[in-house]
């Protein structure tokens, strides 16, 4: 008498990997894992989008490791599933997609006329989108002119400036978001 003893099928083990943050338009790299005992048949793997404000596009949706791009910034939930012919198992990963960084918007104000003995009040503006997350660095400087320009608060958009000599000066207000 010949007796064959087989192992019962075990469900696949699925891990969608750690949560990810990316900045548009860069792809997010997903590092999922799927393991199975090979029973009862071939393993089918599939990435899909459960939620999010736009569309997620996978480069290799049938592989556990893939890249994904997004049509809009926001929070997405993606699912990795595996089916072994009998059992299906899933896991999810959260992806935060940040908008692309835009340059600061700077306005030094209108051209002005002053007398040499008076301080000139400059009311510039500098705004930013808050990305990439660092502080906004502001700087007034003199580009051209016959003398020196002395700013009372050169790292603030609103400042006073005095000049050492009469003439025409070109001043610059710059801002950097890092």
Image: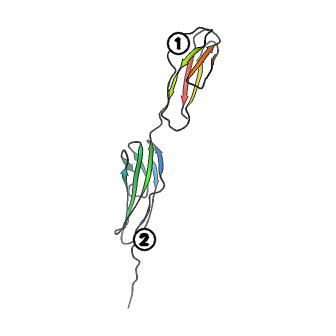
Q: Name the residue rendered at 48%, 47% in the picture.
A: 21
- Quadrant of residue 65 within the rendered picture: bottom left
In the picture of the structure, the residue carrying the numbered disc 2 is: 37
Q: Residue placed at 59% from the left, 21% from the top?
A: 141
- Spot occupied by residue 15 in the image (x, y as percentages of width and height): 45, 60
Q: How is the image coloured?
A: rainbow
Q: Position of residue 100 (x, y in %)?
A: 46, 38
Residue 112: which disc? Answer: 1
Q: Nearer the viewer, mark 1 or mark 2?
A: 1
Q: Residue furthest bottom?
A: 1
Front residue (pair 171, 122): 122
Residue 71 point in image, percent of width and height: 38, 43
Q: Quadrant of residue 61?
A: bottom left
Quarter of the image where the C terminus is located: top right
24, 156: nearer the viewer: 156
Q: Nearer the viewer, residue 68 or 21?
A: 21
- Crowd band around label 1 with a 10 angstrom C-alpha radius: few (<14), some (14–19), many (20+): few
């Amino acid at each position: 008498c010949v007796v064959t003893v087989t192992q019962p099928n075990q469900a696949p083990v699925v891990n969608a990997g750690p949560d990810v943050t990316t900045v548009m338009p860069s792809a997010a790299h997903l590092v999922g894992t799927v393991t199975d005992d090979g029973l009862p048949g071939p393993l089918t793997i599939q990435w899909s989008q459960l939620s999010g404000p736009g569309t997620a596009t996978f480069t290799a949706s049938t592989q556990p490791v893939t890249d994904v791009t997004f049509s809009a910034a926001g929070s997405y939930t993606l699912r990795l599933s595996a089916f072994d012919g009998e059992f299906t198992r899933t896991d999810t990963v959260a992806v935060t997609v940040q908008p692309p960084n835009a340059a600061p918007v700077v306005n030094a104000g209108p051209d002005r006329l002053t007398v040499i003995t008076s301080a000139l009040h400059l009311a510039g503006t500098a705004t930013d989108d808050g990305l990439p997350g660092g502080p906004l660095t502001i700087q007034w400087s003199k580009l051209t002119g016959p003398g020196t320009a002395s700013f009372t608060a050169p790292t603030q958009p609103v400042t006073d400036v005095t000049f050492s000599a009469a003439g025409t000066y070109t001043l610059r207000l710059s801002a950097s978001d890092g």
